[in-house]
Image: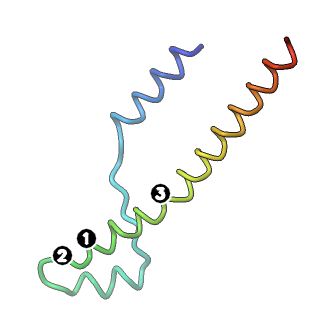
Amino acid sequence: MKTKIVCIFILLLIFTVSAEAQCAMCRAVLESEEGQEAAKGINNGIVYLMIIPYVLIGVVGYFIYRNKRKSGASKEL
């Protein structure tokens, strides 16, 4: 079971899709610019800000898992 989860995780990392996270208003304004450097920067910033909540939830989930596991091991003793 554990190897299956690891294989799925590796496949998800290999087959990533680039995300375009601009809203319609931002896209309309930034597409008219030449060079598209500001558009790329704003898109990267939006994606960066989207990642932070998922990382925080993962860290909190890990600590909850670790505490539950530790308390279960202490009950067995």
**The furthest residue to the left:** 35
Give above or below for 13 relative to 26: above
**Residue type at numbered disc 1:** Lys
**Residue type at numbered disc 2:** Glu
Between 71 and 11, the one nearer to me in the picture: 71
Residue drawn where x is 40% and y is 63% of the image: 47
Q: Quadrant of residue 1?
A: top right
Label 2 near label 3: C-beta < 8 Å?
Answer: no
Disc with the residue nearer the chain's start (3 vs 1): 1
Residue where numbered disc 2 is placed: 37
Q: Report crowding for label 3: few under 14, some 14 to 19, many 20 or more residues within 10 A (C-alpha).
A: few
Locate residue 51, reporting x and y percent: 47, 57
Label 3 to label 2, Cα distance in Å?
Answer: 21 Å
Give above or below for 26 relative to 53: below
Q: Quadrant of residue 40?
A: bottom left
Label 2 near label 1: C-beta < 8 Å?
Answer: yes
